[in-house]
Amino acid sequence: MSAHGNTYVPKSRLAKWFESRLPIAGLVHSSFIAYPVPRNLNYFWTFGAILSAMLGVQIITGVWLAMHYEPSAAGAFNSVEHIMRDVNYGWLLRYAHANGASMFFVAVYVHIFRALYYGSYKAPREVLYILGVVIYLLMMATAFLGYTLPWGQMSFWGATVITNILAAIPVVGDTIQSLLWGGYSVGNPTVNRFFSLHYLLPWMIAGVVVLHVWALHVTGQNNPAGIPIKSGKDAVPFTPYATVKDVFATVAFMILFAWFIFFQPNYLGHADNYVPANPAVTPAHIVPEWYFLPFYAILRAVPDKLGGVILMFGAVMILALAPWLDTSRIRSCNYRPIYRQFFWVFFAVCIILGWLGAKPPEGGYVIAARVCTFYYFAHFLIVMPLVGLFETPKALPGSILESVTGPGKQVSGSGVPAGAAAAPSTKG
Amino acid sequence: MTISLSILARRAGPLLAASLLALSLGTAASGAAEAPQPPRQKWSFAGALGTFDQAQLQRGFQVYKEVCSACHSMTLVRFRNLAEPGGPGYSANQVKALAATYQVKDGPNDSGEMFERPGRPADAFPAPFPNDKAAAAANGGKAPPDFSVLAKARTYERGFPWFVTDVMPFVGYSEQGVDYIHALLVGYEEAPKGMDVPEGTHYNKYYPGHLIAMPNPISDGQVTYPKTDKGEPVVPETVDQYAKDVAAFMAWAAEPHMVARKALGFRVILFLIVLSALLYYVKKRIWADVGGEVHGLQPELHKAY
């Protein structure tokens, strides 16, 4: 797993015995203790740790909720209310889980935009980045499935809308739809199998997270300067430097999380989802959770159903092509004066798309959504390839150390052990 | 080349965003005739430290019991909830006596028969109708909604920028549903001239679309509140006061652990703030031996080099 050489030296006889049979302690040591971290990372680089923490929170609260939840059309709504009213601290478990999903997406969006701004998707980190896109896709599927489980009006109609758009897929669409439904419409078998899948997917996320971290530890972290570690002075060992920073950032993030759980637990949800599912009554506005709104806006911007589905999925899939669409060899936007401005326009377009996704699909909203959808794809297909060809980047600093201290200065007492410092000098 | 592109990009960004916003805002007003926003009331349970007013919950329960419960069920609330901490504060004996005044369907017994028995604290409030179809048939075709989570199931759009401030500390607002219920109960009035009010519907100022199936359910003086020593009611016996009391009661019914939630939240957030402050100084201390705080390179900083 580690490309940095094994710096772990087992001390006790038992540790030596075990290490020669399964070198897992050495693996942990080289990945989370001696692992060299660029010393110029800012707080945007703590969101990997925050995301790991959120995955843990979701799995733990989810396993406990599943002990009390009843996956059936007749019982789901009342079992959720049973959790809220009668299970000890059930309200805490459920609000933590529901808001945890939103916080998970807050963190993943920061993580994704950080990767896009600092060019973390470029060589040699393409596979690391694509694994991230896979995790994001799995997260979206998991969140959608989870939102259907309370079996309120928005659960039911959200499930109906999404499974109906899947039917637009040529050839296999109908089969996928009836497999998800377990019948001829959204009903009891649907909530039953959605629960099963909702329990399955997080473990797949956890598995891909392991691959994601593995790939990260082969290539090393990108950094705000976007240049590789060249000497030991450019890096600090993961523990204690990155560890303490990650723990601090995670605890700080938990303040935001706790605010939502305890004081605004229903702010990010929909009131309609406290109305039990009723196939005979359609809500006035069927709106997905906030984190899907940009994609929902893209779906509805296209007059053709299949076209809308293709663009909606395409909007996620195109992320995976970024390493090859971006023609610039400079990673960090800090040194790309033109692309940096396009990046912020793209960011604004994503926000506007999110806002449009919450609005009814009529009049000017549709026109605006079409313009933004066009720009979204143009950013990847036109801006990314072209700007890289014409832009004159700023001069890169000579080293990560130089990017922190300025050229020619030396910093005394870099707390880097020799072993950690020596290995990464071969990275590029 | 690069300079002109850069200027173009700099100008195009805000321009594009602004024109899109203008486009979209232009259509925002063109929706169907919207109901006015419910007037915001003062609630004892609003805000980060809010708690329910026990006397108000008891009055609200009285209104529910004497008026609303004729048509509206509340099947997720159990009698025992009325004695639990953070709620209306009835004693266990009061709840036992109250439950016994209800007849609850139970069974089947050993001979296979369903039977009625007096209620117990563990029973849920019995519904006024045996099922939704019966409720609809007795109420002009539309079943009256269950009260259990209704205060959370109703809301109204506040729009930008309020939806941003509503989530914030100190200026936050999460009582939209309760305000809507209060507004609905005081919102019955004469339909404007020329408006057609079909048979079986009633004009309500705050109901979306204005035509509600529920007739005006309550009038001034209909519920007799407890009296003070001077023989005056503790609060005015008006529709406005009934509406406030029953809306507060419904807020409790929808969220019986709200007081515990906010109390725990206060402690959790305080703990997290102290812990993160301590961790911040630990982090500063540890990073001090690599030459102080290490920031990501900002372009402005880079220019100075």
Image: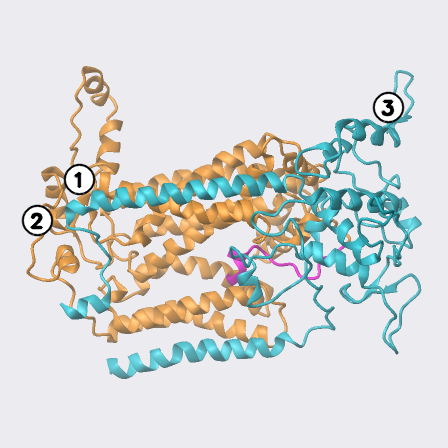
* Image quadrant containing the N terminus of chain B: bottom left
* Image quadrant containing the C terminus of chain B: bottom left
Mark with earlier residue (1, 2): 1
| Secondary structure mostly seen in the magenta stretch | loop
Amino acid found under the numbered disc labelled 1 = His
Amino acid found under the numbered disc labelled 3 = Gly
Q: Nearer the viewer, residue B23 or A71?
A: B23
Judging by colour alone, the chain drawn in orange in this rendered image is: A
Q: Position of residue B200 (x, y in %)?
A: 91, 61
What whole-number distance in Å separates the C-alpha atoms at marks 1 and 2? Answer: 25 Å
Above or below for A386 versus A253: below
Q: The numbered mark 3 sits on a residue in which chain?
A: B
Whether the magenta-drawn stretch holds residue B231 is answered as: no
Q: The numbered mark 1 sits on a residue in which chain?
A: A
Badge 2 marks a residue whose secondary structure is loop
What whole-number distance in Å separates the C-alpha atoms at marks 3 and 2? Answer: 82 Å
Q: Colour of chain B?
A: cyan
Task: Report the residue marked by disc 1.
Answer: A4
Task: Report the residue marked by disc 2.
Answer: A412
Measuring 19% from the left and 19% from the top, which residue is drawn there? Answer: A16
Q: Is residue B32 left or right of residue A32?
A: right
Q: Is residue A307 visible?
A: no
Same chain assignment for discs 1 and 2:
yes
Above or below for A249 versus A375: above
Same chain assignment for discs 3 and 1:
no
Amino acid found under the numbered disc labelled 2 = Ser
Magenta residues (range)? A281-294
Q: Please identify, in this view, whether the residue under mark 3 or under mark 2 is nearer the observer.
A: 2
